[in-house]
Each structure stands twice: as C-alpha cells, then as structure tokens.
Image: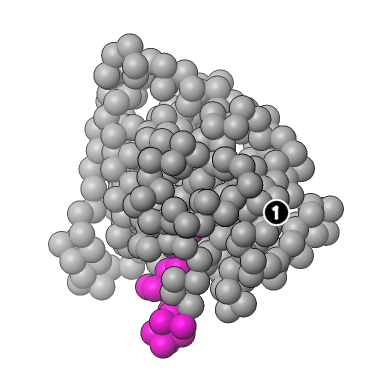
Amino acid sequence: MGSLKGKDILHGNQFSKRDIDTIIKNASYFEKELKKKKALNLLEGKILATLFFEPSTRTRLSFEAAMQRLGGGVISLGSVESSSVAKGETLTDTVRTASQYADVIVIRHPRTGSAREAAEAVSTPIINAGDGTGQHPTQALLDIYTIYKELGSLKNLVVSIIGDLKNGRTVHALVELLSLYQTQFYFVSPGALRMPEEITSNLTQRGIKIEETEDMLKATNASHLIYMTRIQKERFTDLSEYERVKGSYIIDEAFLKKLKKKITILHPLPRVDEISTEVDDYPGAAYFRQMRNGVFVRMALLAMVLEGIP
Ligand code: CP
C-alpha cells in the first residue's frame, strides 16, 4: 500500500504488515502526545465529514474527537431523518455533496459494498466505518493496536473469536489483519452464525489454522485472547431465529472461574448480555482500554490520509 496520503480505507485486506507497523507507531506517538497536551494543530484548516446511515457511538465520537484533537474541524450529516436522505437523495449524491465541503469522509451504511461505491463516486478519501455485514477496517486496526499493547506482540497468537461471526463486520476485518501474523483461530458460534465460507476458505487456502466449534470453554482455554461479539439483532429478518440464538455465549464470573489461566478479553462494543458487567474488573478485561485506543488509531489514520505522515 505504501503512503496512505489521499487513499481510501475500505477493507482489512488492503494493509500489509509494514502498513500496520506504521499505523501502530503513529498511534503510539499520538497517544504519548495527547498525554502531554490535549490538542495538536497538524490538521488545522482540514475538515472531516461524518456520514452515518446506521447508529454509532464509539466510531463516530472517536473519529470526531481524533479530528478535533489534531486541530481539524468536523461536519456531520446528523441523523438520516434530518438530512436530504429523508427526501430520497441517493448515497452517491450525498457523498458528492460532502466531498465539496470536506477533505475526508467517514461513512457508515447498512449496505455491504457501500463504502467502495462512495469511493468510486468521488476523489475525496473515503474511510469505511462499517458497511453492513462487510468490513469495519478502522475497528480492526484499533483492535490490532490494542492486542499489541495488551500482549506485547502480534505473532503466533491463538485467538478465539466468539458470537455472531456471520454478521460481524469487525471480525471480518480483524481476521484479515491477524492472519498476517501466523494467528491460529478458533471460530466459536452457533451453527446459524458461522464465519462466512469465503473467509474461512481464503484463510485455509493461505495455510492459516482455523477450527470452527460451538465449545467456548475448550477454545478459550487453548487461546491467548478472546474476541467477543454481540449477536446482531438488527441483521435478522426472522426475529424468532434471533430469539433462538441470543444468549448463546456469555462471559460471566462463573465462566471466568472455569478458565485455566488469565486471558485477555476484547469486544468491539456495544455489548448486550454477552459479557456480564461483573467481568469489567477482571484484569484481562481490556474492552474499555480498546475503545479508548480508537482515538489514537484514528488520529494516526487521519494524519496519514490527509498529511501523508510517514
Ligand atoms: N465498535 C463500534 O463500531 O461501535 P459503534 O457501533 O458504537 O460505533
């Protein structure tokens, strides 16, 4: 990939190990700089547009915070109902409009492939903040940064990814990145929510070891890291099917007692019931630190896309 200047960020598979090293280095730099002072002026005069056609708390707020910490400005579509999308304006026309006002556009949309469509419509860099059940590459990059900080290395890890693997765009992007580091995967899900076949077959063809199982305890006891995900009610067309699988996997105090050793637990959040609040004080529970890392990684990405910092 080389320099990110002027580039779109659309998919986990666009990053090499070298790119990831650079992003980690830059995120770490911004984390340290923010400890010294709260605001920098690297992106003064630049504008970020956030176009969120699906709900978000962390991605949107951390992108907006990242831009403002770097001295830039933010404009936002606000709710879909309060924009001309409510009058029937297309995604492409909405993105064309934002590109006249902003230097970079962050977009979340329910349709898989929508970010790429947006990128094809304009020359302004597009950052995919989640396209349906497709990809969420900036979440995967902050997950990688968190794993590096929590475990000290990305190499040769055994990782259990648990929950809604069919619909989870965060995990679809994360396995792309982790697979660069000889990761072994346990994919733990109900049968109806297994990792898509195109992802598992791609991993297998590349010699990556994966095991699909419904046994969370067996998988986690063999792993360095748990990546827990929410069963995504909003993706089900048949709610009775959701009722059948909801609550399939829950990490609570009773489950932690069954573990043979301390383990690191990540979750992209939001959570519903899959991690009990009693787990929050467990030393390996890193999901709130993970959420905070989003600002540093997104600062790095904005600075790299807009200023081409090496
Ligand atoms: N992890 C994540 O994408 O969170 P939000 O949906 O709150 O942005």
Q: Which residue of the protein is positioned furthest toward the top in this rendering?
A: 36
**Residue name at image x 79 percent, y 52 percent:** 208
Could you say whether the residue bearing mark 1 is in a helix, strand or loop?
A: strand
State whether residue 215 appears in this view. Answer: yes
Asked if residue 202 is among those painted magenta in the image, a careful observer would answer no
Quarter of the image with the C terminus is: top right
- Between residues 106 and 186, which one lies in front from this camera angle? 186
Magenta highlight range: 229-244
State whether residue 302 appears in this view. Answer: no
Q: Is residue 223 left or right of residue 303?
A: right
Residue under label 1: 185
Going by the numbered disc 1, the residue's amino acid type is Phe
**Residue name at image x 30 percent, y 60 percent:** 55
**Residue name at image x 31 percent, y 54 percent:** 56
Asked if residue 235 is among those painted magenta in the image, a careful observer would answer yes
Check the image and report above or below for 280 versus 34.
below
